[in-house]
Image (spheres, coloured by chain):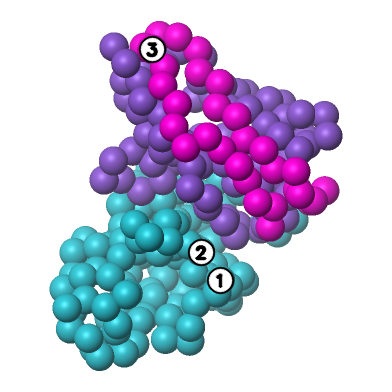
Amino acid sequence: DAKTTQPNSMESNEEEPVHLPCNHSTISGTDYIHWYRQLPSQGPEYVIHGLTSNVNNRMASLAIAEDRKSSTLILHRATLRDAAVYYCIAGGGATNKLIFGTGTLLAVQP
Amino acid sequence: KAGVTQTPRYLIKTRGQQVTLSCSPISGHRSVSWYQQTPGQGLQFLFEYFSETQRNKGNFPGRFSGRQFSNSRSEMNVSTLELGDSALYLCASSPGGSGYSYEQYFGPGTRLTVT
C-alpha cells in the first residue's frame, strides 16, 4: 500500500473553497485514491474516490495529478458541517482494504 | 435504505474474557469490513468478508476473528481480551464484487472498554 502524506491540519473560512492536498508517490497502477472524512464521535464517511481521471460528486471533486503521485480533494464551498478529519488513502488495489493514515484536521471558521 | 448498524454500541469487559460484536450491512451489500480505531494507532484494518469468506486480512493476532452469514450480517470475536483491545470497532459495508474498489459505508461503531 502506498504511504500518503497529508498536512496535519488546515483552516478555512465558511463558504470558501478548500483544497486538501495528498501525496502518494509510491502508488501502484492498480491503487485507487480514496477520500473519507470523520466527524467527531462518528464513523468515517465516504467522500469520493477515483483511479486516474478527475472525479466529481455532490460532496466534492477529486483532482488527480497526471503521474498519480498526488491528488487534491476540493470542497467547493466549505460549511461548518465540513469540519472533520479528512483521510486520503491510496492502496489496496481493486479491493476494499483501506489503510488509513493520520489525516488532515480541517477547521472551518464562520 | 437503512444504514449500517452495529450492536452493542458500548461494552465493558474484563481482561481474559471474550467478546462478540455484530454488524448488519446495508441491504444488498455483500462485503463487510472491520476496523479498529484507537487514539494511538488510528484506524486499522482488521479483515473483510465477502459472500461468507474472508477476502482480506490485516495484521492482527489470531485472537481477532470474524465470520459472515448467508444474509451478509457479520460478527467479529476477540478472545482473551487485553487492555490494549480497548477501542472503537467499526464495521463498513460495500456492494462488493471483485476487480473494483467500492465506496464503503461505515456504522457508528462499538466502543469496547477492557478493564
Residue type at mark 2 is: Phe
* Quarter residue B12 falls in: bottom left
Cα separation, mark 2 vs mark 1, equals 5 Å
Disc 2, disc 1: CB below 8 Å?
A: yes
Q: Which chain is cyan?
A: B
Q: Do discs 2 and 3 belong to a common subunit?
A: no
Residue type at mark 3 is: Asn
Q: Do discs 1 and 3 belong to a common subunit?
A: no
Q: How dense is the environment of label 2, judged by Cα within 10 Å: few (below 14), some, or many (20 and up)? A: many
Residue A45 drawn above or below residue B106: above
**Apparent side of residue A32 relative to residue A105 in the rendered image (left or right):** right
**Dot label at residue A13:** 3
Q: How dense is the environment of label 1, judged by Cα within 10 Å: few (below 14), some, or many (20 and up)? A: some
Give whichever of A3, B6 is nearer the camera: A3
Residue B87 on image: x %, y %: 30, 65
Q: Residue at x 49, y 77 (%)?
A: B60
Q: Quadrant of the N terminus of chain B?
A: top left
Q: Is residue B101 visible?
A: no
Cα separation, mark 2 vs mark 3, equals 33 Å
Q: Which chain is purple?
A: A
Residue B7 drawn above or below residue B94: below
**Dot label at residue B58:** 1
The stretch of residues the image draws in magenta is A1-30
Q: For mark 3, name the chain.
A: A
Point out the frontmost of discs 1 and 3.
Answer: 3
- Residue at the disc numbered 2: B45
Give whichever of A87, B9 is nearer the camera: A87
Give whichever of A102, A91 is nearer the camera: A102
Residue B15 on image: x %, y %: 22, 86
**Apparent side of residue B43 relative to residue B15 in the rendered image (left or right):** right
Residue type at mark 1 is: Gly
Cα separation, mark 1 vs mark 3, equals 38 Å
